[in-house]
Amino acid sequence: MYRLFSWEHSYFSGKARAYLRFKQRHGALGDGFEDILATPELIQGLLIPRSGSGAVPQLQTPDGSWVQDSSEIIDVVEAAHPAAPVVPDPATRPRQMLAAYLLELFGDEWMVVPGFWERWYFSEDGRSPNHRGFNEQQWGAVMAAGAPGDARRAAGHGFFEAAFGISTSRSDPRGVYAGLVHLGCGGDMEFAWQASQHRILERLEAHFSQHDFVLGGMPSLADYGLLASLYAHLYRDAVSGFALRTHFPIVCEWVERTNGEGALNARMETQKLYSLDDDGELLPRVATSDGGAWLEDDAIPETLVPILEIFFEEMWPVLSDACRVLTAYIESDAHEAGGEVPGKTFTATPGFEHLQTGTGALTHEFELGGLKGRRMVVPYQVWMLQRLEAAIERASESREGEQSLREFVSGFSRGEELLELSSILKGCRVRKEGALLYAER
Ligand SMILES: N[C@@H](CCC(=O)N[C@@H](CS)C(=O)NCC(=O)O)C(=O)O
């Protein structure tokens, strides 16, 4: 059996868990998986010694090896269990493949900023509405699992002060509050990120009004990437959860469907809807849209295009500039050939703060909603682009595949640059070993 070590309130845990539930529901995960609450005792005594990192989610495979980062978890499980695939085959569905990887990247590494911000903004002193109590409870439920309720809540409360200095979040940002600044979500920029998120949600509401999942009637990698932001932060957290349910009820229904729990009304791809035949007997039919499948002929749903447009408008310029900045750093004397580069996303990586904060060599200017900000370069995003590059190469092995992709991306702002990924990544390729990333050069 697989073991997933996760938290209910963790961004990337929601993505990995929903994906594993999908494979399990389809009988495509061998003996299945156990979802294990990653308490501090397990993190200190098991995860860190075995995998070198305390981040969640982490997956222990039946042979005892450890896998981390939700995308690598999905890659490893897809390779071991190819039935009920979540990644469209690049050879036969190149456009859907591209959309799936792009929206995974967008959900994981762009929507993370406003999702992360909403959790901590509405937990600050003096904010109204305020979900600090709920947030203390959900963190305390991990930190003091099994203790009485008041002790769990107190554990969350104490941790927020000790680790994040929550009462001085504006004057002396630490922990998560420092992370938001590193990600370019400090000062004026925070409302630009919120506006970006609202625009995405409006377009998702329109899309899910027509299709039950991103690519039709069956989930794909894109749904799990988007769920990272949508589940733990925007759906579960109290203030954002109220707003999501109130303004974007169809997106909420998709969250329940994709999360795969408490979803009877929302319907799942393994569920049947019934009507009655002439004899009053139950007559089953597929419960999800589009005949319960991805659209045929590698079609991209019309309502998905406006969402991809936001990726190309907002995120792609930042990603391509980040590649340029990382390349310059790797070529500089500050970097030792083949040495480590910063890792995960939420804050600057310990040991790399001087590079990833302020005007350090691994920071760059970016634009959002007409405002200019500064943020850190996140080499993990380069690793994600390398996965996309490999899939584009497979899709481009045939002339038709290459042409189909070219026509598709040419409809987006700077879209054709994606077909030049190899030259963009040439100077900044990274190698991933568990939690750590190393430059190839
Ligand atoms: N890119 C990773 C991110 C993992 C991650 O950053 N996890 C967060 C919680 S969602 C975490 O564990 N942070 C605490 C830590 O890194 O020790 C993924 O896709 O899984």
Image (spheres, grey):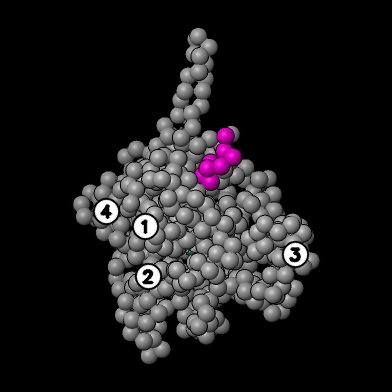
For marks 2 and 1, give the one nearer the viewer.
Answer: 1
Give the image location of residue 392, x and y in percent.
Answer: 30, 57
Identity of the residue drawn at 36% across and 51% down: 78
User: What segment is highlighted magenta in the picture?
Assistant: 257-264
Tell which tag, 2 or 3, sits nearer the viewer: 3
What residue is pinned by disc 1?
63
Do the CB atoms of the residues marked 3 and 1 lie less than 8 Å apart? no
Residue 248: assigned label: none
Q: Which residue is mark 2?
A: 432
Q: Is the C-beta of the residue carrying label 3 under 8 Å from the nearest atom of ligand 1?
A: no
Question: How crowded is the residue under tag 3: few (<14 C-alpha within 10 Å), some, or many (20+)?
Answer: some
| Residue mark closest to the camera, 2 vs 4 | 2
The residue under label 2 is which amino acid type?
Answer: Lys
**Drawn side of residue 424 relative to residue 290, left or right:** left
The one nearer the camera, 266 or 10, is 10
What residue is disc 3 on?
Answer: 154
Most common SS among magenta residues: loop
Q: Position of residue 397 (x, y in %)?
A: 21, 55
Give me the residue at 55% from left, 73% from top: 347
Q: Residue at x 59, y 40 (%)?
A: 262
Which kind of residue does numbered mark 4 sit on?
Ala
Q: Quadrant of residue 84?
A: top left
Residue 370 placement: quadrant: bottom right
Alpha-carbon span between mark 1 and mark 4? 32 Å
Measured in 3D between alpha carbons, the distance from the residue under mark 3 to the one under mark 1, in whole angstroms, is: 38 Å
The relative height of residue 333 versus residue 246 in the rendered view (above or below) is below
**Which circle, 3 or 1, is nearer the viewer?**
1
Ligand 1 within 8 Å of the CB at mark 2: no
Residue ID for mark 4:
395
Q: Is residue 204 visible to us here?
A: yes
Dot 1 amino acid type: Asp
Element carrying mark 4: helix
